[in-house]
Image: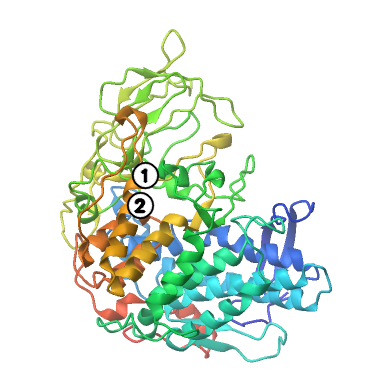
Amino acid sequence: MKSKFLNINTILLSVSVLALVGCTNLDEKVIDEVLGSEVADPEAALAAAYSQLGEGTFVDHGSVFALQEYSTDEALLPTRGSDWGDGGKWRAMHEFSWDANSDVVKTTWNQLNFGITKSLTAISSASKSNGNNKALFLAEAKGLLAFYTYTTIDLFGQAPYRDPNNINAPIEIRKAETTIDALITEVEGLIPDLAEIKTQNTHAGRFTKQAAYALLADMYLNRTVLKNKATSNFNFLEPAVNGGGNDMDKVIQYSNLLINNPNFSLESNYFHNFDINNDTSKEMIFTIVQKKIANSDKGSDNDLAYMSMERIQKPSPDNRGTNASCITPEFYYSWNGNHDDPRFQRTYQYEDGTWFKNDGTDVSVPSTSKVEGTGKPWFHFNRGLQVGQQYGPKILQNGNFDMTADGRIKVYKLFTEKNTTLAADFTPELNFDNPSESVFTQAQINRGVRNFKFEFDPGYGNNGTSGMDVPLYRLGTIYTMRAEAYFRNGNTGAALADVNKLRTSRTRESLYNNAPGVAIASVDANTLFKESGYELYWEMYRRKAMIRFNKFDLPGTAKPASQPYKRIFPIPQATLDASPDFKQNPGY
């Protein structure tokens, strides 16, 4: 079978569609979906559109995350000796050497287009249904279409569209500069038909009124950038699309609807937002719900934790990291003077009160914590930015942890797995032999501070599966956006109050007497940019922030100074070859 819809990719896609949690009693479905074909069951079609959020698109390190983070100072994936060369596709994201044939660019474009197509299919299916949930499902499908489209025009400057109720309609190319206002109007028009979160069996994994408010705040904050990507003099105070006021007034308006909503509150333990059980966090507004499946990598992805952990770091005898991504020295040193900030790092405490300090003083930790699905011991690594010498368990020849006589997990100084004489000492400096190439020799694979913000889920002994929901919008995101809107509107006092609300609402662990973060006395553009990084690092927002604050084009580490056209990515050459409807972005 061939797709006659969008005509961008001809593909038969077998997808695992999870029934909408809490909506009906439908079991998990597996359907063969031809892109663009009508799915008779509107709920299945909507579930497929939701499923695409987690089919690599926003959860795998090599898709939206790569474009939004590996292109910034927050994250990079260098070549490490014999690993992660892959034709240079990963380091190209940091060195700004990508082009229209780059695999990472093509993968991200395709996955977002799948999301657009599945959303259009869901809209078509809901429009033709007569069920009691018709208006709700239709609004959710349109909300998802807006989210996929907004992400696509932000990254690529253009996105495909076709009338979902007429498969013979011509393809339309939605350009960022002309589409952003239409998207804002569309999402505002959906609000009456969307559910309030936690009503009509909804939750943070559904596109509710609250998800719409968050998306609208995001779109208004970035509206001037999408309309004028090549300039450095963005007009953040342009009159709003609808309802009077300017863009920043709208960011504040929609943020207020979330900040003042009693369903949401800031978590004192910042890292709970990124725990395996973060579905209990009170910050979650719109998330990707992940579901662990035994003996399978389907249904979820562990990349946000797995990619930064060294191979010798083993949460269980059956799991390990992969020694790939790290942060840049620029981002690490931006935390100078803020290492006591509760968002920088958190030490793990076991049930018997033992702390894993990761400083060489640990001898052993309890083995009472067990991995779901295997019952094997679970070693909990600390969270946040991990720098310096690392410690942890050792695997014996029988494949089990080395244990003490009384059944505790022994703790050792760690050495890298692929260079067993090289200490697992995560250095802030990268010091590439060729400063313009992010390539390490086998003797340098320990370099780079690692990010353990997201909890590694060792469930079922599967490195690729996680029960952690991936936050797309949470309350901390909203406070950060509102602070910036206040600042750009000239209300620095309100901006400072929001920044300090984030800083002081977070507390450290009891090892440090639950000390709250410390307020700052003033805020300017550079301070606000740094604070945005403290709150949102590795959450796929850095690229947008760097562009808004005129930081994206600057050189750093192995990245050269770049031209403004690099603020968006090229349309893949395969798409241009297959469809005359797309034109390449300027500069490529």
Residue type marked 1: Arg
Taking depth in this image into account, of 9 and 530 the one nearest to the observer is 530
Question: Which residue reaches farthest right?
Answer: 130
Determine whether the residue tagged by mark 2 lies in a helix, strand or loop. Answer: helix
Taking depth in this image into account, of 483 and 532 the one nearest to the observer is 483
Dot 1 surroundings within 10 Å: few (below 14), some, or many (20 or more)? Answer: many
Question: On the picture, is 290 further left or further right than 397?
Answer: right
Quadrant for the C terminus, please: bottom left
Residue under label 2: 502
Residue 380, above or below 546:
above
Residue 370, above or below 168:
above
Residue under label 1: 506
Taking depth in this image into account, of 472 and 211 the one nearest to the observer is 211
Question: Which residue reaches farthest top?
Answer: 405
Residue type marked 2: Leu
Q: Residue at x 69, y 55 (%)?
A: 18
Taking depth in this image into account, of 166 and 258 the one nearest to the observer is 258
Question: On the picture, is 179 further left or further right than 291?
Answer: left
Asked if one can make out residue 312 in the rendered structure from this viewpoint, the answer is yes
Residue 311, above or below 71:
above
Question: On the picture, is 364 further left or further right than 431?
Answer: right
Residue 204, above or below 9:
above
| Circles 1 and 2 in contact, beta carbons < 8 Å | yes
Quadrant for the N terminus, please: bottom right
Q: Residue at x 30, y 30 (%)?
A: 512
Determine whether the residue tagged by mark 1 lies in a helix, strand or loop. Answer: loop
Estimate the x, y position of residue 403 in percent, counting from the top left: 43, 15
Estimate the x, y position of residue 313 in percent, counting from the top left: 38, 34
Label 1 – label 2 distance at C-alpha: 7 Å
Toward which corner of the image does residue 69 lie, by quadrant?
A: bottom left
